Image: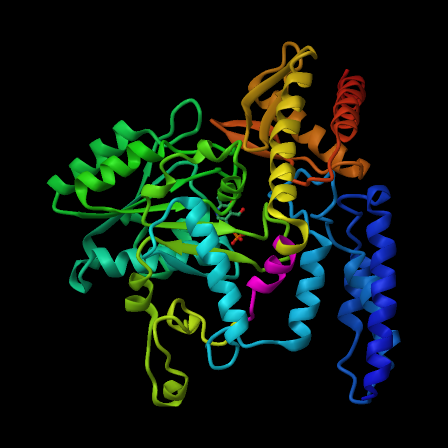
């Protein structure tokens, strides 16, 4: 293979992407996903002869990258969007070029040093002590899994596993239950504690259920709180949960995959008060910290717990053994070979500066509050959960419509707005109601984007009402 040709093609691709990025505003957030493209892809054989790289790259541009939702679009308000800094993208390219092995100090001391510096910075923001630590993992699901595995190891003897009980809320992300299942807990070992009117875990119910479980001979071992729930951006009452965990000797995990990034903002850090009392925190950088997938972290109050859980010493790794200062990250988590996920975040933090990032977070929180206030000025739009950590849920309630009709109407609004391509808004369900959910965390999103979105929503409602007359 001709290396020069590959470099040249990559430079062409960079131009192509530069052009895409400069024009992203005019792109559909969810382009019309094209089945023809899928059929064409399926038809491409594995070539026994070599092919021209430009031809293959062109094919990938036409059939793959053009046939996806643009989660980095400034008007992508669906799921948890992924506003990616070009710096993260650049860091990803640089890192995969040199491909440092992130598992051991022997193989990549500088990348390991950067990983521990960033983890230390995050732990400080969370208010953790010097004994804390953590590592980068692929995403929030893996971060939760890593924390739960550690919690089980610390809090339960092996013969107690079948009686262990973990407590979540009815708003906890599904990755927590999935993680518990992966490490061997049955569904009936997970208690779903109800939430209050602000979709926060109800602490009185939590304590009642823990006491009932203890009385029945079960062994409560972990409470999973959320700082920034996926549906509503709610933060569970962290101090009160910490009190309960202290009282009953339970592991206190905070799923901050979405919301922990708010710790970067001096202005809004207080919203996560009490997080410093947790035993572990999941914190995704590929959500609100502007990183490409996969870039997440798990922070642990006592880093030795990670080592007790995950460290192994086979003979073929002996030469890489280190002292305390020189971390072998393969001893901290499930992965042995692992990419140096921290480097793209390092490039972003260093180049952008913390103040810029913090301003972006504050901008998003305030923009969604602005959207709520604007929506309130229109008739028949109902706020279902107020703007919190840049997430808002609302719906349109047509006059005289019954529950099912309201649900259907809002689904139709979401579909119409998605079809328009201008903005991506999907639905979720809150207390049995189908609602429109906006999660807006892209620092590039403007007030005008929000104003135009509301105008479009109003216009769609008008059209739908004409249709249903
Ligand atoms: C609160 C919360 N936890 C965990 C996850 C899972 O994260 P990931 O998709 O990175 O695995 C998400 C994803 O949206 C989330 O919102």
- In the image, residue 342 lies in the stretch drawn in magenta: yes
Looking at the rendered image, the quarter that the N terminus falls into is bottom right
In the displayed structure, does residue 250 sit left or right of residue 182?
left
Q: Is residue 175 above or below residue 309?
A: above
Q: What's the coloring here?
A: rainbow
- In the image, residue 214 lies in the stretch drawn in magenta: no
The residue located at (26%, 27%) in the rendering is 204
Pinpoint residue 400: horizontal percent, then vertical percent. 63, 10
Nearer-the-camera pick, 367 or 33: 367
Pinpoint residue 388: horizontal percent, then vertical percent. 54, 29
Nearer-the-camera pick, 126 or 232: 126
Q: Main secondary structure of the magenta part?
A: helix
Rendering quarter of residue 399: top right
Looking at the rendered image, the quarter that the C terminus falls into is top right
Pinpoint residue 156: horizontal percent, then vertical percent. 20, 57
In the displayed structure, does residue 223 sit left or right of residue 263?
left
Rendering quarter of residue 81: top right
Nearer-the-camera pick, 205 or 259: 259
In the displayed structure, does residue 297 sit left or right of residue 45?
left
Pinpoint residue 2: horizontal percent, then vertical percent. 83, 87
What range is drawn magenta here? 339-349
The residue located at (53%, 31%) in the rendering is 267
| Number of callouts | 0
């Amino acid at each position: 293979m001709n290396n020069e040709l590959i470099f040249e093609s990559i430079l062409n691709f960079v131009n192509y992407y530069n052009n895409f990025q400069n024009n992203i505003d005019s792109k559909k957030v969810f382009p019309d996903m094209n089945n023809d493209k899928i059929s064409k892809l399926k038809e491409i054989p594995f070539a026994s002869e070599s092919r021209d790289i430009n031809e293959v790259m062109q094919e990938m541009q036409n059939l793959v990258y053009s046939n996806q939702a643009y989660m980095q679009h400034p008007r992508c308000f669906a799921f948890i969007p992924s506003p990616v800094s070009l710096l993260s993208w650049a860091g990803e390219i640089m890192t995969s070029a040199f491909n440092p092995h992130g598992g051991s100090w022997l193989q990549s001391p500088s990348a390991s040093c950067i990983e521990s510096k960033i983890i230390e910075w995050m732990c400080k923001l969370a208010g953790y002590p010097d004994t804390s630590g953590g590592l980068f993992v692929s995403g929030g699901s893996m971060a939760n899994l890593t924390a739960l595995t550690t919690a089980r190891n610390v809090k339960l003897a092996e013969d107690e596993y079948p009686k262990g009980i973990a407590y979540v809320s009815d708003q906890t992300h599904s990755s927590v239950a999935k993680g518990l299942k992966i490490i061997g807990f049955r569904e009936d070992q997970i208690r779903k504690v109800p939430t209050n009117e602000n979709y926060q875990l109800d602490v009185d119910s939590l304590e009642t259920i823990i006491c009932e479980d203890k009385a029945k001979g079960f062994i409560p071992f972990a409470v999973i709180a959320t700082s920034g729930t996926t549906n509503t951006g709610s933060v569970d009452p962290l101090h009160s949960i910490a009190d309960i965990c202290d009282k009953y000797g339970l592991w206190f995990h905070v799923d901050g995959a979405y919301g922990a990034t708010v710790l970067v903002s001096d202005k809004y850090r207080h919203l996560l008060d009490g997080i410093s009392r947790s035993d572990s925190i999941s914190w995704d950088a590929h959500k609100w910290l502007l990183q490409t997938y996969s870039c997440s972290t798990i922070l642990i109050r006592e880093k030795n717990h990670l080592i007790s859980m995950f460290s192994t010493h086979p003979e073929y790794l002996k030469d890489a053994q280190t002292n305390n200062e020189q971390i072998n990250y393969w001893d901290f988590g499930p992965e042995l070979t692992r990419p140096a996920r921290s480097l793209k975040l390092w490039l972003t933090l260093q180049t952008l500066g913390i103040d810029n990032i913090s301003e972006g977070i504050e901008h998003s929180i305030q923009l969604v509050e602005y959207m709520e206030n604007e929506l309130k000025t229109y008739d028949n739009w109902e706020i279902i959960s107020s703007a919190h950590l840049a997430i808002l849920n609302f719906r349109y309630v047509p006059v005289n419509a019954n529950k099912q009709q309201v649900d259907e109407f809002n689904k139709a609004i979401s579909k119409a707005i998605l079809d328009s391509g201008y903005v991506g808004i999907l639905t979720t369900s809150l207390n049995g109601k189908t609602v429109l959910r906006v999660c807006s965390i892209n620092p590039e999103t403007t007030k005008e984007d929000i104003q135009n979105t509301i105008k479009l929503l109003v216009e769609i409602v008008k059209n739908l009402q004409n249709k249903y007359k």
